[in-house]
Amino acid sequence: MSSRPDSPWHYAQTFYALVKAQTKLHALIRFVGRTESYSKSDSDNEVINSQLDEIEQHLTSARQKILVIKIMDSNLTQKIEAELAKKDCNAGEIKDATGASYPEIFTSLKQLSDTGKAEYYFIYTMPLPVLTYQLKKPFWKI
């Protein structure tokens, strides 16, 4: 199991932390629902506080993992932008330059195209056309 932030296990650990927090929250809701308001004791309050602390720990863990993922995504997007500034590239060339996986590359390229920073075209070669990406140029520089 890889601890790298770009590994699928990192996403799975984040999801697992969120599921654990949700499970604790549901247990807490059931506990509070079963306890009558007039019969609550100090021990009930301690149980509730400890459950809330555990939920907060799980959510904090998930937040940290998500922050690392976002930082990785923005770094990859910047690397891809720098590569495209040098020359037009296909996904394989971007993979060689950045070392990222294809799903991460295509996610970053989609973000770049959605923001209007990149566009794609096909180079028609034999036997198949090659999908190539370039930075979008302002209309006055075409």
Image (cartoon, rainbow, N blue to C red):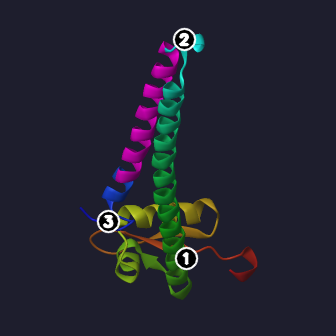
Asked whether, in this view, residue 72 is left or right of residue 141, the answer is left
Q: Main secondary structure of the magenta part?
A: helix
Check disc 2 and report its element: helix, strand or loop.
loop
**Dot 2 corresponds to which residue?**
36
From this view, report whether residue 139 is shown above or below residue 102.
below
Q: CA distance from mark 3 to mark 2?
A: 45 Å
Q: Which mark is residue 78?
A: 1
The residue shown at (46%, 21%) is 31
The residue segment tinted magenta is 13-34
Residue 30: x percent and y percent?
Answer: 46, 20
Crowding at mark 1 (Cα within 10 Å: few <14, some 14-19, many 20+): some
Q: Quadrant of the N terminus?
A: bottom left
Give whichever of discs 3 and 2 has the lower sequence position.
Answer: 3
Residue 139: x percent and y percent?
Answer: 73, 74
Residue 53: x percent and y percent?
Answer: 51, 43
Check disc 3 and report its element: helix, strand or loop.
loop
Q: Nearer the viewer, residue 24 or 7?
A: 24
Q: Are marks 3 and 2 in contact (CB under 8 Å)?
A: no
Q: Which mark is residue 3?
A: 3
Q: Which mark is residue 139?
A: none
Residue 9: x percent and y percent?
Answer: 31, 57
From this view, report whether residue 8 is shown above or below residue 3.
above
